Image (tube, helix red, strand yellow):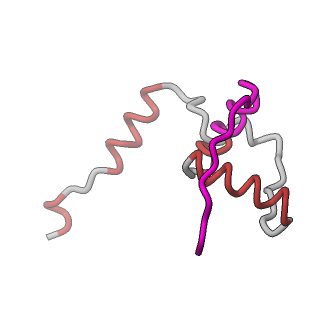
Amino acid sequence: MNTVQYTIRGIPKDVDAMIRKRALREGKSFNKTVVEIIQAEVTGSIKTPKTTIFDKLRGANTLDKGFYEAIEDQSRIDEKLWK
């Protein structure tokens, strides 16, 4: 696919923050997120997901550090059990 590169200046900080938050939430790169937003707005070919009351929690580290340590510990593979 042929693509073009842009340099865009003058993006308001709050817009930048929203795009970065969306990219993090969706697990995509900043660039891919911006391209999808532009493409959806211009062509309507990509549907933007509906927001829900849970969107603020998705991707946010709302749980304490101990929780993530416990989950990480449970995710380790015990090689002795898999032989």
Query: Residue at (51%, 25%) from the top-left corner?
Result: 64
The C terminus lies in which quarter of the figure? bottom left
In the image, is residue 7 part of the stretch drawn in magenta?
Answer: yes
In the image, is residue 79 part of the stretch drawn in magenta?
Answer: no
Where, by quadrant of the figure, is residue 43 drawn? bottom right
Where, by quadrant of the figure, is residue 61 drawn? top right
Q: Position of residue 53 (x, y in %)?
A: 82, 40
17 left or right of 30 in image:
right
42 left or right of 18 in image:
right
Q: Position of residue 22 (x, y in %)?
A: 68, 43
Which residue occupies the foreground of this view, 79 or 48?
A: 48
Query: Residue at (32%, 42%) from the top-left corner?
Result: 73
In the rendered picture of this protein, how many numbered marks are placed on residues? 0
Give the residue furthest to the bottom: 1
Up-down relation of residue 43 to residue 71 (above or below): below
Up-down relation of residue 30 to residue 5 (above or below): above
Q: Position of residue 63 (x, y in %)?
A: 55, 29
Q: What range of the chain is rendered magenta?
A: 1-21
